[in-house]
Image: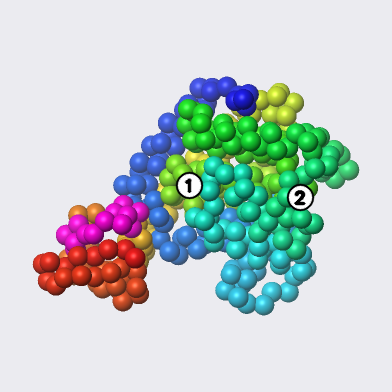
Amino acid sequence: MKPPYKITNKILNLISKISEQIGEIKSARLTRPPTELRKKNRIKTIQSSLEIEGNSLTVEQVTDLINHKKVIAPEKDIVEVKNAILVYSKLDSFNTYDLDSLCYAHKLMMTGLVDNPGRLRTTSGGIVRGEKITHIAPSGEMIYPLLKDLFSYLKDDQDLLMIKSCVFHYEFEFIHPFTDGNGRIGRLWQTMILKEYSKVFEFLPVETLVKEKQQNYYNVLAKSDSQGTSTGFIEFMLGIIKISLDDLLKSQNLNVTGLDRINLFRDIIGEKEFSRKDYLRNNKDISSATASRDLKEAVDRGILLKTGDKRLTRYKFK
């Protein structure tokens, strides 16, 4: 059963603008942003998503944990961050369209924080903010069939993946399938879905803007609940995505390393063999000497296999 929502003019306009942005990002070769920016954005994503849930660690403390440095903070907050670092490092190992994969992500995210991490809720549940109950979730026996329907919609419906990512996010929060950790998993899984649309979303810190507009985020969730449709939430999240892409385009003057170019080319060429000429064809703004240095570094690091010699030299990603 398809979740209830309408495709409004606002949604269509935002989708059009986002599509234009994705085109600009591809032209600027920012589909896989520079290493420096990827690391910075991943840290911001983790810190922001957890701060929304009440975690006290700063960006600097999250950075220290990623760099295996000691941090003085509440143990629960440290466990939350370490778990999130692990989960976000494994994005490519999860199956976007598989419920068991989502449950495994929850298990990794919530180990040491809740009983039976990764297990769907069987009791009643809801959301309390302060002293007020803001959402009463479906009963425990409804969780599994509702999630099966939601994943069927995600996999089979013909609407644009960008729209489905927002619908999934809203419906997941409405179902509230776990006793805890639903917010961070819902945001994580929207990233998983968006990553299917474009690799750029793997390192785009959408959560940072959600944190900055946290009250609006809660308000639009509540309004969608009262209206029985996710239309308003789709509009809100598409607006957040557009701003995030704007911020990425403003960063395009950051230094791009040889390994950044190699990793981007990997997304293009896949497992096919290629020559230096093929590599240059996709990096027209660098010299032949720079291309040779990029390829040599990748070979030395064990990223590429090299066969042949001189003009017959061929490369292939391991």
Which residue is drawn at the image coordinates 47% and 60% (left, top)?
A: 38
Mark 2 = which residue? 180
* Secondary structure under the numbered disc 1 in the rendered image: helix
Residue type at the position of mark 2: Asp
Mark 1 = which residue? 195
Proximity of marks 2 and 1: CB atoms separated by less than 8 Å: no
Which residue is drawn at the image coordinates 66% and 25% (left, top)?
A: 229
Foreground of the two, 253 or 33: 33
Residue type at the position of mark 1: Lys
Q: Quadrant of the C terminus?
A: bottom left
Q: Is 273 inside the magenta-drawn segment? A: yes
- Whichever of callouts 2 and 1 sits on the residue coming sooner in the sequence is 2
- Residue 50 found in image quarter: bottom right
- Residue 284 showing in the rendered view: no
User: Callout 2: 10 Å neighbours few (<14), some, many (20+)?
Assistant: some
Residue 188 place in picture, x, y as percent? 60, 49
On screen, 36 above or below 95? below
On screen, 6 above or below 262? above
Q: Which segment did they paint magenta? A: 266-278
Residue 68 is tagged as none
Which residue is drawn at the image coordinates 78% and 68% (left, top)?
A: 74
Residue 37 place in picture, x, y as percent? 46, 60
| 131 displayed left or right of 159 | right
Q: Quadrant of the N terminus?
A: top right
* Secondary structure under the numbered disc 2 in the rendered image: loop
Which residue is drawn at the image coordinates 73% and 46% (left, top)?
A: 120
- Residue 117 found in image quarter: bottom right
User: Callout 1: 10 Å neighbours few (<14), some, many (20+)?
Assistant: many
On screen, 318 above or below 243? below
The outermost residue toward the left is: 311
